Amino acid sequence: MLEDAMKKMCILVDTREKKNKHILTALEGRKCPFKPQKLDYGDYTCICDYTDKNGVILADKVAIERKANLDELAGNITRGRKRFEREFQRAKADNAKMFLMVENTAGFDDIYNHRYRSAIPPNAYLNTLFSWQQKYNITISFVSDKFAGDYIYATLFMALKNYLIYEESDENA
């Protein structure tokens, strides 16, 4: 049953997510269906319709917030800080696991060496990320744009699999 369920995973892509053709192409390559849907937080989550019941919607359990580069992330923690942080607050209130995926392979090293356009000092940038990582239980991952779609797929695949194995059985007990 588990294998059949996993084959029915569908990625939900927030309707506000833009410039993600490379991610959608990667999902198509994996033959993983996806569809646009407004999400309360994050840019990607998944559903699985594997029974005649409603199936499983992980939107309030796990989500991936994508940033295309360090400049976009810097803008979100400076100019858009309140809105961006509210997203993490909503996820924490739902007890959802959030992943912050940034398309930049050098990640912390590039932040430390101020290889981004924003005037935010590296220590303030890093301290914000480290603080939010703890405060909101965020996993921060730096990936290449070539791997971004695979990262999203693998992260949500494992979240769904673990949910079906461990959490759903607990809910039905």
Image (cartoon, helix red, strand yellow):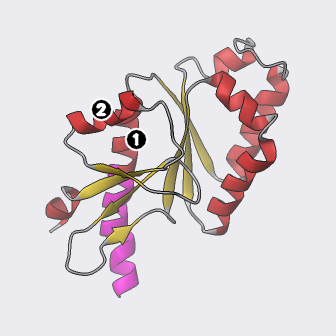
Element on which disc 2 rests: helix
Q: Position of residue 97 (x, y in %)?
A: 55, 56
**Contact between labelled residues 2 and 1, with CB atoms less than 8 Å apart:** yes
**Is residue 132 depicted above or below 125 in this figure?**
below
Q: Which residues are magenta?
A: 157-173
The relative height of residue 70 versus residue 23 in the rendered view (above or below) is above
Residue drawn at point x = 30 percent, y = 32 percent:
26
Question: Where the C terminus falls, by quadrant?
Answer: bottom left
Residue 129 left/right relative to 156: right
The answer to which quarter of the image holds residue 146 is top left
Rendered image: mark on residue 152: 1
Q: Residue at x 65, y 23 (%)?
A: 70
Above or below, 10 against 118 in this view is below
Asked if the magenta segment contains residue 160, the reply would be yes
> In the rendered image, which quarter is residue 108 located in?
top right
Judge from the rendering whether residue 1 lies leftward or rightward of residue 112; answer left or right: left
Residue 67, magenta (yes or no): no
Residue at x 73%, y 28% (from the top left corner): 74
**Could you say where residue 150 lies in the image, as x and y percent from the top left?**
34, 34
Which residue is the site of mark 2?
Answer: 26
Sequence-first disc among 1 and 2:
2
